[in-house]
Image: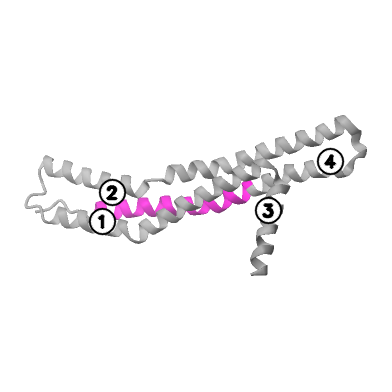
Amino acid sequence: MLWLIDSFQAIRDFMELGGPILRWIAVTIFLMWVLITERLMYFRSSMKLMAKEIHDSWESRPERRSWHAHQIREMMISRFEMASNKGINVIQTLVALCPLLGLMGTVTGMMKVFGVMAVSGSGNVRAMAAGVSQATVPTMAGMVGALSGVLLVTLLSRRAAREVEFLSDSLTMDH
């Protein structure tokens, strides 16, 4: 139980070190990972079920060659594609937002450094160090958050495109 308290204190100290922008970065990364987790769970369960339902529905059609049947097929594929890509644009936006928030943390931290320098000159190293840490910690956190999300959002996008292509190929037009 002591390790849990120590971990909580270390996280709290880190959050205080980075300033108020670090809280926004933490919320952004948390939301990004919630959405990534949701998509991963969707790909493992609901997407397979939806693809099977669409495939079965298409295969049970008595006629598949007419223009009308082709439009129904395209509608089924389009709905599947929309469901597969749901939330991926939001994840991409959150990934792009992480380094921007980190940059904002850099600017606010450097403003603190320049404020200290304006008041006490460059002799107060301790006060300047607090501003420098407030400038660098959010930058690092924003980049780590973006890097962790960039890989997974790329994998999710590719998987969604591959599943849509597979479904499209499996819905035959003969009969």
The answer to whether residue 152 is magenta is yes
Residue linked to disc 4:
128
The tag on residue 80 is 2
The tag on residue 15 is none
The tag on residue 12 is 3
Closer to us: mark 1 or mark 4?
Answer: 4
Q: Position of residue 171 (x, y in %)?
A: 20, 53
What amino acid is found at the position of numbered circle 1 in the picture?
Ala
Q: 10 Å neighbourhood of mark 2: few (<14), some, or many (≥20)?
A: many
- Toward the left, the furthest residue is 62
Q: Position of residue 84 (x, y in %)?
A: 34, 50
Q: CA distance from mark 1 to mark 4?
A: 58 Å
Q: From the viewer's perspective, tell me whether residue 5 is left or right of residue 52.
A: right
Question: Circles 1 and 4: CB distance less than 8 Å?
Answer: no
What amino acid is found at the position of numbered circle 3 in the picture?
Arg
- In this rendering, the answer to whether 78 lies above or below 47 is above
